[in-house]
Amino acid sequence: MSSARLPVLEKFIADLRTVWSAEADNQRRMERAKPLLEQLVKDAGLKAHSASWPSTEGYKNLLLYVDPDHHFVINAVVRMPGRTGSVHDHADAWVLYGVLDGSESLERYERIDDGSRPGYAEVRLASVSTGTQGKVDLVPPGAIHAEQGGPTRSVAIIVRSQRLGQGTVLQSATARLRSRTNWWRDEIARLRGAGVTCAYEIDANSAAARTTRSEWPER
């Protein structure tokens, strides 16, 4: 491991490697990793360090670490005030999402159609939880959700059981909907909190196109 990493991140990686070595099941791994991430995102030094991290606008992630043996991934996202996220899932990946700075909301959706129409899904907003520094959410494979930025700049640390881009994902902002982007944003805003059903397309290529597009130096 590089000596250029912050000590707190170095320890976090070592602790995750210990968990991954001890557990073969990804769900157990992520459940044990959750309190480790909660501790990491409460670190004042890491929060101060993240103030210089660049924005990840444009569906980019900052790549902090990829484990060479167990293949888990640590990313960061930096959202500008009021950033709107799209409805999606992470296919086969387990994901831990921890707020390091600012506030963010996690919207969880449930699918209500029978899946018989190829390339189409109907979903309903099931819950919304808002958190500040120290809040960590566990998102299982296939769980449909969206992350929304708060009124100020926000930073989150993400642990993934694997790189994204594997499997079929649900993604609202597909090429077929890009011509309706403004309409979609307005409609999602209207539906939030109302429990109204909305529909969106399935895009098997969106995860590969939308994740880990930029890397962040580990210093």
Image: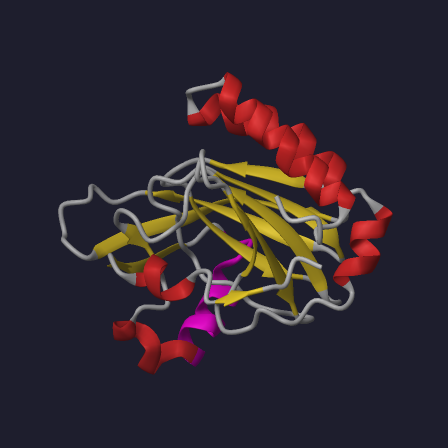
Number of numbered discs? 0
In screen coordinates, is 215 left or right of 168?
right
Horizontal relation, residue 212 to residue 31: left or right:
left
**Quarter of the rendering containing residue 50:** bottom right
In front: 148, or 23? 23
Q: Is residue 96 visible?
A: yes
Question: Is residue 190 part of the magenta span, yes or no?
Answer: yes
Highlighted range, magenta: 182-194
Percent across and percent down for residue 21 are 50, 22
Magenta highlight: main SS? helix
- Looking at the rendered image, the quarter that the N terminus falls into is top right
Residue 140: say if magenta. Answer: no
The answer to whether residue 103 is left or right of residue 163 is right
- Quadrant of residue 86 in the image? bottom left
Picture coordinates of residue 66, whole percent (x, y): 50, 47
Q: Residue at x 63, y 63 (%)?
A: 217
From the viewer's side, name the closer residue of 199 and 145: 145
Q: Is residue 166 above or below residue 24?
A: below
How far across and how far down the image is residue 126, in percent?
Answer: 48, 42
Find residue 138 and report its horizontal and vertical position in percent: 55, 36
- In this rendering, position of residue 89 left or right of residue 127: left
Considering the image in quadrants, where does the C terminus appear? Answer: bottom right
Q: Residue at x 71, y 54 (%)?
A: 4
Residue at image position (59%, 59%) is: 148
> Between residues 199 and 79, which one lies in front from this camera angle?
79
Residue 134 makes an appearance in the image: no
Foreground pick, 101 / 202? 101
Residue at image x 58%, y 69%?
56
